[in-house]
Amino acid sequence: MTFLACRAYENGAQTTHRIEKMSIESLSKGEVLINVCYSGINYKDALAATGRGQILKHFPLNVGIDLAGEVESSTDPRFEVGDKVLVNGCGLGEKHDGGLAEKARVPANWVMPVPDGLTMRECMILGTAGFTAALAIHRMAVNGQSVDKGPIVVTGASGGVGSFAVNILSNLGYDVTAVSGREELFDYLTELGATQVCSADELGLGSKPLEKARFGGVIDNVGGNLLSQLIAHTNLWGNVACIGLADNHKLDTTVFPLILRGVSLLGVSSTNCTMPLRKEIWSRMGKELKPNKFGTILTQEVKLREVSCVFDQLLDRKKHGRILVDCRA
């Protein structure tokens, strides 16, 4: 039996991909074979498929760090044929054949039942983007983040992670300042629940090591100088969740906000999240952390055969929100 997959190859120093038919025997090893129904296209998937980022650990490999589908077969008694399941992170689409395929075979310990309150389709609209946003919010809350500390700044707000962060935080009662360099998407961010929408320049941030405390916390997808400035403007005992590096991987700051205001810089790694916490976050996304703007955040749905045209558009900032992939055969 053959099935369709988006498979990446290394040609010398260049990474390419193609949509091709392959056999189950060629898949990475694992106890659970899944008929993939939905996946999504993340920034990391686009980097992997195009070779514009060093994501893949070996070749050839199916890309796609997310999947939701139904169990076709399992040698692990925890899963039965027909079970609706999802997988995200854990090395999927990086060191193990990923979810942009009609079938995937994965280790049983990576597999989770689709949570109550979510459909398979909703799980993949969320995908790693929604999971990462919820994980950041969880880490901030565990560390004492509260509405009374002030507004939360979300940078890179029009991307997948940023969009879900804005929507979830708003639903939890926070004032959200959404920061985006794309003025044409300001109305989109307002619809998601942002109290204020502006560019980074319009924030009017200072450059001193310790600036006037203006924000209760930050969810940052950008890195670089903007992150440094926001740390300096964070209020007493506020939390800064560091997620991405859309602008820069460097961080030039001082210890002053940390030791004089008790500001905490929290790293958020969705790939390496422990399975107990991963299951907890997914469960909460079907409940109190469930977004209420799925229809707004989902901006495009494509078939598996059509994914190639989307990768460069995503990397070139011609897309926003989430892109869902229908992988059903």
Image (cartoon, rainbow, N blue to C red):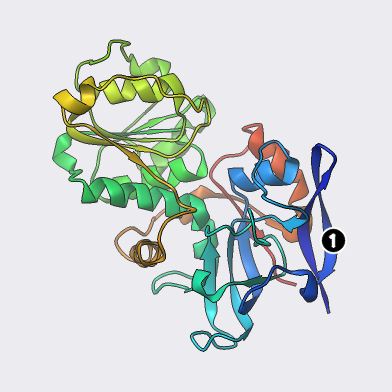
Task: Say whether residue 63 is left or right of residue 172.
Answer: right
> Residue 145, relative to residue 6: is it above or below?
above
Provide the secondary structure element on which disc 1 rests.
strand
Q: Position of residue 263 (x, y in %)?
A: 22, 31
How many marks do you count on the picture? 1
Q: Position of residue 127 (x, y in %)?
A: 52, 57
Q: Which quadrant holds the C terminus?
A: bottom right
Amino acid of disc 1: Glu
Q: Which quadrant holds the N terminus?
A: bottom right
Identity of the residue drawn at 55% across and 88% down: 80
Identity of the residue drawn at 50% across and 73% down: 109
The residue closer to the viewer here, 120 or 135, is 135
Q: Is residue 322 visible?
A: yes
The residue closer to the viewer here, 63 or 258, is 258
Q: Position of residue 66 (x, y in %)?
A: 58, 59
Q: Position of residue 93 (x, y in %)?
A: 64, 56
Question: Where, by quadrant of the figure, is residue 174 drawn?
Answer: top left
Q: Is residue 214 visible?
A: no
Question: Where, by quadrant of the figure, is residue 326 drawn?
Answer: bottom right
Q: Residues within 10 Å of mark 1 (few under 14, many from 20)?
A: few
Task: Say whether residue 37 is left or right of residue 197.
Answer: right
Question: Where, by quadrant of the figure, is residue 154 drawn?
Answer: top left
Task: Say whether residue 261 is left or right of residue 114.
Answer: left
> Residue 118, relative to residue 10: is it above or below?
below
Give the residue pinned by disc 1: 20
> Residue 320, relative to residue 223: is it above or below?
below
